[in-house]
Image (tube, rainbow, N blue to C red):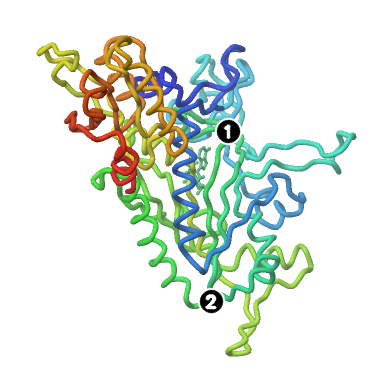
Amino acid sequence: MEKLVSLAKRRGFVFQSSEIYGGLGSVWDYGPLGVELKKNIKERWWRSMVHEREDIEGLDAAILMHPKVWEASGHVAGFTDPLVDCKHCKNRFRADDPRIKGTPGQPDGQCPACGTKGTLTAPRQFNLMFKTFMGPVEEQAAVIYMRPETAQGIYVNYLNVLQSSRQKVPFGIAQIGKAFRNEITPGNFIFRTREFEQMEMQFFVKPGSENDWFERWRTERMKWVEGLGVRPEKLRWHQHGKDELAHYAADAYDIQYEFPFGWQEFEGIHNRTDFDLKNHQQHSGKKLDYLDAATNERFIPYVVETSAGADRTTLVVLCDAYREEAVKGEDGADKEEQRVVLKLKPSLAPLKAAVFPLVNKDGMPEVARRIYDDLRRRLNVFFDDGGSIGRRYRRQDEAGTPFGITIDGQTSQDQTVTVRDRDTLKQVRVANGQLVEYLKEKLAT
Ligand code: ATP
C-alpha cells in the first residue's frame, strides 16, 4: 500500500490535503492525473445509470439540507458509533478497538495509546455527522449538518423529479456528490476519509417487487464493476448479517474487493424498504405516496439503493492496476529492468497517449509538437521530450498511459510513427494520418 501511496503522490494522482501545514487527517486532494481518473469513473457510472437507461433521472442536490431531514432519516439519533475517551491522554477510540485491554469505564480498562489504566470512559454514542451553523448566530437553532450520504437529497426531491420528468414507478434517481463523516478510525489512504464522494442511485418500486429489483440491481452493479477491468477473482459479495444491517435496511449486499489490507466493501446494494419516504412524509407533513394510474392503487414506493464511493472505486481501480514487472530495457540495452506500471483500462486512463520525439534534433521535436497539437484537441495526451526514451516510457507506465507515440528518423521519410503498447510493449508503425482513428478504436472499451 505504501508503494501505491507514494506512486500516487509522485505522479500527481493524490496528495494529502493541506500538506504544507502537516496535512489534515484523512482528507485527500486529487492531482492532475487523479482528477482525470476519478472523473472518468464517475462519467462511466453516470453514462450507464442516466444516459443509457430510460427509467433513471439525474439529480444534483445541495450538500446543506434542512436539519429536519436528518431527524426523519434517523441520522440524528442513529448515525453513531460507540466510543471511549481516555481522560489522561485525550485520545478517542472505538469501543470495539481490539487494542483496548480490560473494560472501558472500569479500573482495569487500559488506554491503548498512553497505557494508563482506569482512565477510559464507559462507551458513549458519538454522532458521525459534521455540524455547522447557518447564518450569523452560533446557537442551537442554527445548527445544520454536512450531509453524511447523498441519498436523502434524492428522497426529498422524489416528488419533484417524478412530476417534472413524467416517470412512472418503477423508476430511479441517480446522483454523484460529496458526503462527509467524522470517522473516528479513518485511514488506508482514500479508503475511509472524512470527505468523500458517493455515486448513489435510488430505485423506487412497487411494494412486493423489491426483491426482484434487488436481484436485478445486484447483477447490474457487478457487471458494471467488472467493466472497470477489475480482476474478477478480486471481487466477491458479502451479505450483511442481522447485526450489520443499517437502521433503514431489510437486506444488504456489499461488493468487496481484496485490497492490500484485506477484503473490504466499496459498494452496497440495499433494500431500504419504505423507511425513508415514510419518515419524510411523517416529518414533513407532505404526502409522498404514489398513485398507480393503471390499478388506482396508492402506495409509498419501496427503495432499492445502489451506493458506491467514487473514491473507494478509484482506489479499487488503482490497486488492481498496480503491477511491478521485469522488462527488457527499452533504451536499446538488453538487460532486464524493473518497471512499475498501472495497467488501467484505456478508457479510464487519465492520459490516453504520450508523444515523444526520439531525439531533440533532426526536426523531430517540431513534427512531434505538430502531432501532439493535433491529438490534444481530441484526446487527453501528454508531450515529453525530457530524458532517454526508456525513462520517458517508464514515467508513462507509472501514469498508466496506454500508448506511447515516438517520432523517429523514419517519420520524416514515410510519415509514420511508432505506437508502443503499455502492456505488451509491442511497437507498431502507424501512418500519421491514421493515428487518431487507431487510438480511438483502441480506447473505445
Ligand atoms: P464503512 O462501513 O466502510 O464505513 P458504510 O457501510 O458506512 O461503509 P455506506 O453508508 O453503505 O458505507 O456508504 C456507501 C459507500 O460509500 C461505501 O461502500 C463506500 O464506498 C462509500 N463510503 C462510505 N463511507 C466512506 C468514507 N468514510 N470514505 C470513503 N468512502 C466512503
Q: Are the two marked residues, 1 and 2, in contact with CB atoms closer than 8 angstroms? A: no
Query: What SS does tag 2 mark?
Result: loop
Indicate whether 243 appears above or below 9: below
Residue 28: x percent and y percent?
Answer: 54, 27
| Left/right of residue 366 with respect to residue 303 in the rendered view | left
| Left/right of residue 211 with respect to residue 297 in the rendered view | left
Determine if the C-beta at disc 1 is less than 8 A from ligand 1: yes
Q: Which residue is mark 1?
A: 194
- The type of residue carrying mark 1 is Arg
Residue shown at the point (37%, 34%) measured from the top left? 352
Residue 269: x percent and y percent?
Answer: 45, 57
Query: What SS does tag 1 mark?
Result: loop
Residue 166: x percent and y percent?
Answer: 64, 74
Residue shown at the point (52%, 25%) measured from the top left? 109
Q: Which residue is at the front of the view, 6 or 370?
A: 370
How busy is the neighbourhood of tag 1: few (under 14 within 10 Å), some, or many (20 plus)? many
How busy is the neighbourhood of tag 2: few (under 14 within 10 Å), some, or many (20 plus)? some
Q: Which residue is at the front of the view, 192 or 35?
A: 35
What label sits on residue 207 in the rendered view?
A: 2
Mark closer to the chain start, 1 or 2: 1
Residue 289: x percent and y percent?
Answer: 67, 75
